[in-house]
């Protein structure tokens, strides 16, 4: 750990988080010392306000990502993402004039405006906008260790093409929220003098003068203070600094600066010298004057500034033959990401709202002000302490020892007595038992219809074996999600571990320690950690930090956390990368899933004289509602993989699931490819056991050459294999469910039956229109699945089931 910066109130260190041998995540740690005596300035409120602001915009674009925060004997500390450099250093290193770099500078400033819009939508005012407080992230090779540790939507940076040369646009992130404040009401004003002198708004410079009651300028009839308009003035100063490399009022002394900004000197806020520094660009000068209105009432808001900037940027580049360089971050709002819609409370980490509430209850709306019912929660510090936490609205974690189950410590009294009463209030439908074989039975466990016991091979419950079980755990969760079940993870100290320790007592110390660790809890919460990291494509450290901000996390086994990080670096990141430019085709729950290259679905037109059948990979799309009568009469297409069965299956789908589709959609894979070639198994983009374990054949009577398969979890038809007269086998996938998800996502329609409700729940957080899908939008559709602001308020279906893909109607 080394010092990389510091200021009046704190020091910034650069450190490294190493969860596995393959990945080293660099972080920045901001340390603010406590007051040592009563005369020192108390910084607690400032630290609290800074954390509230950063936690409110967690995982947003162009804002510094906060990992964790806390307090110790020396002071307060905040763990942040580490960035390569500041915007000021990057601007100083640019070669050439402002006109030479104009497209890149315009693209960077547009990112800044988007970041300010995010803050102002959350009622956050930064108050200290300057190039030194904006970090940049330059191009990072995709798939490198730690490439996406920071956030679930990390986007690789591409080099946008311009007419003259390739220009790399850095990704910016606002930092240093020490002067920021989050307002509670839209008409609220702040009375504190904040920020850097050279970027302060006129009302901020006048604040100390007009705010004192003994001042001649004091008027009790006028409201005094600052709001979002102060940021818009600072945005104008930042605009000039970015384009010219110097502060707007750098050559002014304080008196001249105050007179110029407040208009007391009667002159122009932008003199001729500064106009020439902008390269004589009239649209840019006009835009700067638009921002630097002396009166806060006449100053534009961020939405108006964005619209004005777009027209000014286009006008400034007109006649140059160039365009604004591409934004390295793909737009979020039009690609179907999940916005939770819940407002973040003033408390940065509210345990009372993060844990608790009925598992059977529906997701609460943002307007619901009733505090959730909080269960008894005990940190799992010892073997005989119970732990219960609600992770999702219908998924809970329980850690309990065999002694408490058997009544050694007094069944019905103490912590376990309270937990037993609470557990009886839920109608658990799915239970995953992480304990060893022979562990004590829960009072309700015999009545649960679906129980999964992990078949541990040893009493140590090894971390690598735990990772091996994850595909089966994920498939079990999808089954629970599609049935809208209530899930309980059970873990804790078991008697099997005691037996293992006694047996290992005559052996080496390592075996005894392994058995002892195997008996402890921590694997159930490690499975939750894997679920969050896998669903939102987050690094293990980022996922752990996110979980700790949502609920009281029990102690995790360090070896399990390290195994997850190692598994993610070696296998999962490459699996995600392989599926970025592919289209997902899956069943209702996602346990049977294929990733078909998008190039197969949108092939380029054949060259002149080239036969269409000469392409290397040919797929065919078929829509069929055939019956045996139509096949006999020859009125249906002959390319149906299951002749005569499509219409009867659509009727079964309506009766079974409440899903009404006019016809069954098929996608023929290229000749020579089997169902396992594109299947997403344990090493695929969607973690599952694969069709070898999840797809079961149907008994076929009428079709001798066609074999249909269905998913074991959701029971719907997944694919069919057809064997021709020469013995060649071809495969056709059912694509109707992907189109169904898209329809639910765009229309918002929700049926009362089980499966449509689950589909609608998994698509309800999506926004935007179903536009065309390119390779880049495919990558963004995966990465834009953002963690909700309140994890215990969402259901398992919203986390475990596949999302609708944008533009899928045009492709399938």
Image (spheres, rainbow, N blue to C red):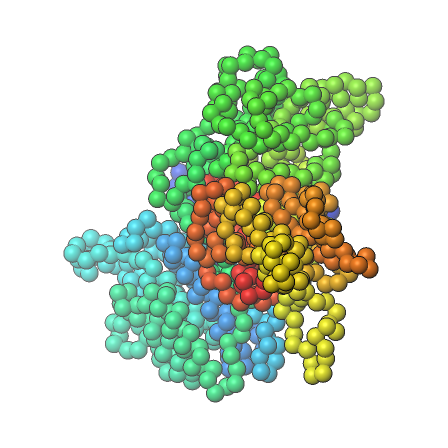
Relative to residue 259, is residue 392 depicted above or below? above
Instruction: Report the side of 731 relative to 62 (left or right).
Output: right
* Residue at the (31%, 60%) spot, across then down: 204
* Residue at the (26%, 75%) spot, across then down: 265
Instruction: Report the side of 770 relative to 513 (left or right).
Output: left
Relative to residue 682, is residue 287 depicted above or below? below
Query: x, y (%) of residue 162?
Result: 57, 79
Q: Residue furthest bottom?
A: 319
Query: x, y (%) of residue 529?
Result: 60, 41
Kindly tell me whether residue 420 is visible in this rendering. yes
Asked where in the image residue 781 lies, by quadrant, the reply is bottom right
Q: Residue furthest front?
A: 633
* Residue at the (69%, 52%) spot, across then down: 720
Q: How many marks?
A: 0
In-front residue for pair 292/374: 374
Query: x, y (%) of residue 801?
Result: 56, 46
Kindly tell me whether residue 579 is visible in this rendering. no
Asked where in the image residue 295 lies, by quadrant, the reply is bottom left
Query: x, y (%) of residue 195?
Result: 39, 58
* Residue at the (80%, 59%) spot, across then down: 725
């Amino acid at each position: 750990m080394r010092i990389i910066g510091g200021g009046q109130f704190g020091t910034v260190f650069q450190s490294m988080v190493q969860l596995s041998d393959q990945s080293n995540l660099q972080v920045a740690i901001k340390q603010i010392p406590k007051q040592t005596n009563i005369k020192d300035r108390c910084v607690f409120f400032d630290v609290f306000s800074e954390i509230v602001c950063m936690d409110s915009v967690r995982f947003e674009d162009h804002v510094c990502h906060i990992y964790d925060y806390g307090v110790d004997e020396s002071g307060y500390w905040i763990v942040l993402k580490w960035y390569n450099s500041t915007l000021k250093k990057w601007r100083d290193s640019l070669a050439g004039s402002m006109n030479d770099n104009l497209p890149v500078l315009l693209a960077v400033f547009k990112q800044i405006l988007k970041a300010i819009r995010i803050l102002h939508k959350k009622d956050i005012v930064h108050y200290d906008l300057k190039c030194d407080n904006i970090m940049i992230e330059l191009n990072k090779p995709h798939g490198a260790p730690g490439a996406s540790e920071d956030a679930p939507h990390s986007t690789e940076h591409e080099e946008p093409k311009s007419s003259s040369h390739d220009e790399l646009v850095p990704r910016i992130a606002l930092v240093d929220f020490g002067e920021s404040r989050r307002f509670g009401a839209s008409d609220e004003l702040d009375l504190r003098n904040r920020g850097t002198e050279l970027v302060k708004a006129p009302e901020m410079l006048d604040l100390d003068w007009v705010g004192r009651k003994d001042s001649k300028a004091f008027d009790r009839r006028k409201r005094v203070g600052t709001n979002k308009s102060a940021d818009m003035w600072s945005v104008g100063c930042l605009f000039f600094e970015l384009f010219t490399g110097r502060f707007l009022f750098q050559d002014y002394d304080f008196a001249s600066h105050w007179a110029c900004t407040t208009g007391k000197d009667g002159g122009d806020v932008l003199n001729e010298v500064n106009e020439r520094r902008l390269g004589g660009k009239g649209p840019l000068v006009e835009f700067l004057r638009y921002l630097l209105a002396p009166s806060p009432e006449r100053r534009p808001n961020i939405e108006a500034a964005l619209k004005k900037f777009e027209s000014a940027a286009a006008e400034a580049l007109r006649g140059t033959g160039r365009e604004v360089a591409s934004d390295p971050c793909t737009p979020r709002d039009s690609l179907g990401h999940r916005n939770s819609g819940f407002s973040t409370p003033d408390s940065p980490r509210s345990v009372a709202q993060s844990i608790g509430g009925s598992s059977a209850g529906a997701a609460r709306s943002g307007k619901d002000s009733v505090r959730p019912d909080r269960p008894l929660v005990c940190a799992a510090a010892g073997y005989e302490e119970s732990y219960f936490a609600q992770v999702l609205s219908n998924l809970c974690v329980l850690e309990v020892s065999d002694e408490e189950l058997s009544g050694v410590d007094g069944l019905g009294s103490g912590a376990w007595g309270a937990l037993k009463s609470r557990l009886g209030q839920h109608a658990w439908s799915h239970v995953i038992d992480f304990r060893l074989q022979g562990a004590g039975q829960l009072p309700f466990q015999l009545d649960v219809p679906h129980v999964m016991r992990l078949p541990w091979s040893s009493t140590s419950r090894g971390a690598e074996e735990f990772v091996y079980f994850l595909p089966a755990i994920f498939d079990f969760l999808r089954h629970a999600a599609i049935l809208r079940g209530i899930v309980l993870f059970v873990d804790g100290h078991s008697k099997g571990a005691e037996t293992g320790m006694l047996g290992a007592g005559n052996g080496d110390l390592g075996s005894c320690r392994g058995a002892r660790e195997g008996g402890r809890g921590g694997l159930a919460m490690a499975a939750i950690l894997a679920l969050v990291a896998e669903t939102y494509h987050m690094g293990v450290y980022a996922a752990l930090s996110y979980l700790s901000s949502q609920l009281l996390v029990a102690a995790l086994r360090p070896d399990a956390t390290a195994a997850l990080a190692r598994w993610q670096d070696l296998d999962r990141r490459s699996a995600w990368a392989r599926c970025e430019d592919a289209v997902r085709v899956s069943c209702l729950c996602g346990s049977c899933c294929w990733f078909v290259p998008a190039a197969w679905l949108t092939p380029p037109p054949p060259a002149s004289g080239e036969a269409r059948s000469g392409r290397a990979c040919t797929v065919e799309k078929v829509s069929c509602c055939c019956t045996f009568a139509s096949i006999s009469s020859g009125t249906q297409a002959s390319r149906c993989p299951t002749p005569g069965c499509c219409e009867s299956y659509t009727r079964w789908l309506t009766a079974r699931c409440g899903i009404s589709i006019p016809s069954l959609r098929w996608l023929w894979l290229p000749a020579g490819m089997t169902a396992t070639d594109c299947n997403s198994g344990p090493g695929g983009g969607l973690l599952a056991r694969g069709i070898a374990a999840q797809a079961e054949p149907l008994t076929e009577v009428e079709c001798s050459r066609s074999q249909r398969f269905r998913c074991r979890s959701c029971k719907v038809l997944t694919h069919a294999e057809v064997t021709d007269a020469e013995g060649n086998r071809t495969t056709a996938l059912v694509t109707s469910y992907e189109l169904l998800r898209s329809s639910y996502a765009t229309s918002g329609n929700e049926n009362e039956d089980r499966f449509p409700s689950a589909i609608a729940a998994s698509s309800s957080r999506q926004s935007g229109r179903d536009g065309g899908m390119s390779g880049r939008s495919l990558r963004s559709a995966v990465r834009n699945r953002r963690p909700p602001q309140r994890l215990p308020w969402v259901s398992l279906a919203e986390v475990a089931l596949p999302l609708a893909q944008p533009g899928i109607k045009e492709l399938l």
